[in-house]
Image (cartoon, grey):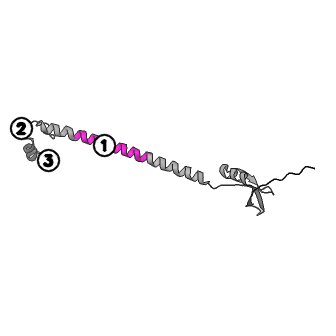
Amino acid sequence: MYTQTINLTLVKQTCITCGMVFGIEEDFDSRLRKTHGSFCCPSGHFQHYATKTEEEKLRSRLSRIEARASRLQDEVDTAERRRRGQKAANTRLRRKIASGECPSCGKHFSDVKKHIAEKHPNFGMS
């Protein structure tokens, strides 16, 4: 006759169908929680862990944070492109005015500021 001693740590379970209390080995319980695999109570009722593990919750949260960061970066990039475009438009406008060209009607004047104040009062240079 052969005798073997086995030390197991069992996790207490209660069947959700019949209420029977039973134990499953700790490592097996851990794998079931990670994989959401099915197992049976001694009476044969199927069960599984439906809730997310902490790791799954953290991965999901990280994924949402990364997606939000990506959207925010896209917004920053768009705002930067707009800023550069506006800066270029302002530079073109300043050069036109400096060369004596009216930015509103395109004609050349020796005193552009006076012309704009008289002919285009809503232009916004005054």
The front one of 110 and 57 is 57
Q: Amino acid at mark 2?
A: Ser
Disc 3 and disc 2: Cα gap in Å? Answer: 16 Å
Q: How many marks?
A: 3
Q: Is residue 106 above or below residue 54?
A: above
Say which of 4 and 23 sits in front: 4
The local crowd at label 1, few if under 14, some if 14 to 19, many if 20 or more residues have their Cα within 10 Å, is few
Find the residue positioned furthest to the bottom. 19
Q: Residue at x 6, y 38 (%)?
A: 110
| Circle number at residue 125 | 3
Which type of secondary structure does the marked residue at label 3 adopt? loop
Q: Residue at x 32, y 41 (%)?
A: 81
The quadrant in which residue 115 appears is top left
| Magenta residues, start to end | 70-89
Question: 44 left or right of 67?
Answer: right
Residue where numbered disc 1 is placed: 82
Residue type of the residue flagged with mark 3: Met
Is residue 56 at all visible to an observer of this figure?
yes
Residue 15 visible? no
- Identify which amino acid the numbered label 1 is placed on: Arg
Q: Position of residue 28 (x, y in %)?
A: 73, 51
Marked residue nearer the N-terminal end (2 or 1): 1
Q: Residues within 10 Å of mark 2 (few under 14, many from 20)?
A: few
* Residue 84 percent coordinates (x, y): 28, 40
Which comes before the other along the chain, label 1 or label 3?
1
Distance CA(mark 2)–CA(mark 1):
33 Å
Q: Position of residue 65 (x, y in %)?
A: 48, 50
